[in-house]
Each structure stands twice: as C-alpha cells, then as structure tokens.
Amino acid sequence: MEENRNKSIKGIKIRSLNLAMIFVACILYLLLIYATFYASHYFSNLVSATEQFVTCEHNADLVQEYSDYLTEQARLYALTGKSEYLEAYFREILIDQNREAAIDALRSHHADDEAFIHLQEALDKSNELVGREIYSMMLVSEASGHHLKDLLSELPIDIPEEIQNMELSSADLLLNSEEMTDKAHDIVFGASYQEVKLNIETNVSYFLTHILDTHKKLQTDSTLDLKKALTRQQVLISILFVENVLTFIMIIQLIVKPLQIYVNNIKDEKKLEIIGSYEFKYLALTYNSIYELNTANEATLRYQAEHDPLTGIINRGAFDKLKQFFQLNPKPLAFLIIDVDKFKLINDGYGHEVGDMVLKKVARLLEESFRATDYPARIGGDEFAIIIADVSPDLAPMIQSKIVAMNETLMNPSDSLPKVSLSVGGAFSELGFTDDLYQRADTALYHVKEHGRCGCRFYEELEEQ
C-alpha cells in the first residue's frame, strides 16, 4: 500500500527543489563574482590607461618645457650677462636634468614605440642646442671682458672639464666685443636656432599625438569592456532577483498555501486537499487514509454502540436517545411495545441458539413490515419496541394488519424454527413522546396478554370500551 501511494503521488519535492535553487544561486553568485572581478579589472585598466596618458603628457611637456627653459636662460644671459641666468642654466643641465628624467620615466613603457624615437630625437636636438647656447655664453663672457671658465668656477656647481676647457674659435677671438655680442645673439635668436627649436616642438607634438591616439583607443577599449562587464553584472543580478521571486512564489504555492488550507481542513474536520509539493501531497494522502480509517472506526463504534449485536436493530441506549429526540421535537407518532409470547419455553425447549434465531427473525420482520423512517428496537431480552413517526390514530387498523401478517408468518414458519407469536400494545400521541406514552402502550400490551396473547391493541381502543 505504501509503495502504491508513493507511485500515485506526482509533485515537486521540496528537497530536490531546494537543492536545485541553491545550485542555481551558487552558479549565479560565482558568475556575478567573476563578472565583478572583470569589471574591476577593466576599471583598473581604464584608470591605468588614463594615468599613463597623463604621465606621458606630463613628461613630454617636461622635455618641451625645460628645453624652452634652457633657451630662456641662455637668451637672458645673452641679453643681460647676469651670472644668475648662467647658474640657472648649468644647474638644470648638470644637476636637475628634468629633460633626461622625463625621458627615463617614459623609457620603461615606450622604449619600443616609434613615437618615443621622436621624443628622444627632441631631447637630442635640445642637447644639440646646449652646445650652441654654451658657445653663445662664451661669446657674451668674452665681450664683457671675462672668461666663461672663470665665471663657472665661481658657481656652486661642479662643472665638467669638457665644458671648462671649451675655447672660442680663432676667428671669433679676433672679433670685437660688439661683434661677439651680435654673434652670441644670432646663435640663440637666429633662424638656424629657431629651426632646431621648431624641430623639437614637432617631435614632442608627434609623440603627444601618437600617445593621445594610442591611449584614446586603449581607454575606448577599456570603457567598452567595462560596460560589457557591468551589463553582465546587471543581467546576473536581474536573474538572481527573478530566481528569488520565483523561490518566494514556489514557497507560497508549495508550502505556505497548502499549510493554510490544511489548517482550515483540520479545523473543519475535513479531509486534506491533495495540493502543494510532493511531501505535502504525501502528508495529505497519509492523513486522509488515517482520517478515513478513523471515520470508519467511529462509524463502526457508533453502530456497535447504537445497535443490538444479535438482531442488528437499534438497542435500548439508542432507543432512549430517540425518545429524548421526540420529546424535544413534538409531532404525531405511534409507539408499540412488542413481546415474543412464551419465549422462555422456546429457550428451554429448543435451546438458546434457536431462541436467538427467533429473535433475529422477529427483528427482520419488524424492519420489513414497517417503513425505513420508523424505528424498531430491541429494548430487552424478548421485548421489542417501535416508534412510528407521522401517524394518527386513524391508521391504527393498518398497523394492526401488519402485526397480524407478522403473526401469520411466525405461526406458519417455512423454516425449521418453531411457531411463535407476538403480543403488541400501542398508543398514539400528538405531542411526540410524552411521559405517559410508555405506560399507556404497556397497559395495552398487558390487555393483549390477558386476553390470549397473539394480537395487537391500542390504548385508545381500551378507552372507548
């Protein structure tokens, strides 16, 4: 039976559903972590690309800026001859070296780039101008009556010997101070100098343009990758949300709702509906089986409590309840008391087994002779009674004829049972089962027994005599 019940149940198992939802949730969370990791990675790439571009732009600007700075100091010295510009110039090329530092900062990431070659060329051109600028300074120094070497020795800077040992050409030594000054100006202001400066600017600009294009593409790619990663995150979060909503819906449909219905069914003492998950359906089927068994047991116990075990008709206890019912619900009825005549002689002569068979036969005839709405009962050993509902005294002849027919059957048995007869006393009531109804029917029965038994008389008939 248990195996057949298991086979007949179809439904989702909570345990299987729970494992499936946990598995799906774990997969989604892992994918979400994976998408989050890549979103973070792409964001880092985007930040890194931006930082690299800023660094490249800054360092390229430094090359241009300090190349211009050297030009500016050289020109100021050429115009004023002040040593402060000389010191600032040599401090930059010998100590600070901002141009070289900017190139070195870019070298590790861009040494192989074609654009870096242009930036390196810009530095080389700037260094090429350094030689011209120093020569211009030598001319200015000579024009003012000093040697550059002497001026450099007064600076708080260690000057390399190759710079200290630089000499003017023999032709330039023959120039007067004004010509030397003019030539010095021409060196740092002339067209040739400007051409080299333009070349430096061109190379730096080329490098910046290339870096801008490269990093713009890198930023664009990183931005697209980041958007894709964020989109994946949004999709996964949406799926997780839908999964959670579905989980709540299934919990309500498979668990909460069946529980509410089951509680109401139990309160109303009904069988449980076969709904919900596999476990709840199994529970409902099991409960219903127990419920049906208990109902059947209760019906059996109630039948046994209310019916005579020998004859199968209602017993004295149930008959007393019927009396109470008809006392509380007054309506016209007839009440009969029935005795089996000389039943002790049958028991003594034929035995109790035959006596029991006679009692069963009498009970069967009572059920067959009267309506299904009438109430025959065994209220003693050989004493029976019957309540006939919704009858009036004018139906007394019909009831008597039924008793006559029963006695005819009992006195002429077609079976092996002995002859037997019934004495019946009855009474009518318009107000249900009144307190004196039993006494009146018993008086009528006594009259029948006193006048030969085997008959039926009503109390009302006796009153008319």
Image: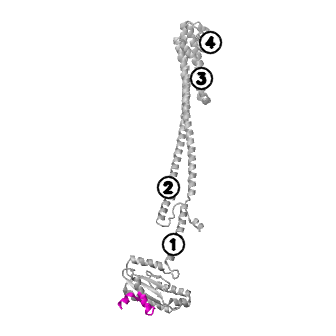
Mark 4 neighbour class, 10 Å CA radius: few under 14, some 14 to 19, many 20 or more: some
Residue for point 55% across, 86% down: 352
Residue type highlighted by circle 3: Glu
Give how far apart the Cα atoms at labels 2 and 4 are: 91 Å
Q: Which residue is mark 1?
A: 298
Give how far apart the Cα atoms at labels 2 and 1 are: 40 Å
Q: Can residue 160 be seen from the camera position used here?
A: yes
Residue type highlighted by circle 1: Glu
Nearer-N-terminus badge (1/4): 4
Q: Can residue 221 be seen from the camera position used here?
A: no
Mark 2 neighbour class, 10 Å CA radius: few under 14, some 14 to 19, many 20 or more: few
Discs 2, 1 touching: Cβ within 8 Å = no
Q: Which residue is mark 2?
A: 249
Give how far apart the Cα atoms at labels 1 and 4 are: 127 Å
Quadrant in which the N terminus appears: bottom right
Look at the numbered disc 1 and give the secondary structure of its residue. helix
* Spot occupied by residue 380 in the image (x, y as percentages of width and height): 49, 83
Residue for point 46% across, 82% down: 376
Give the left or right position of residue 168, taking residue 388 as reference: right
Q: Mark 2 against mark 3, which lies toward the viewer?
A: 2
Label number found at residue 164 = 4
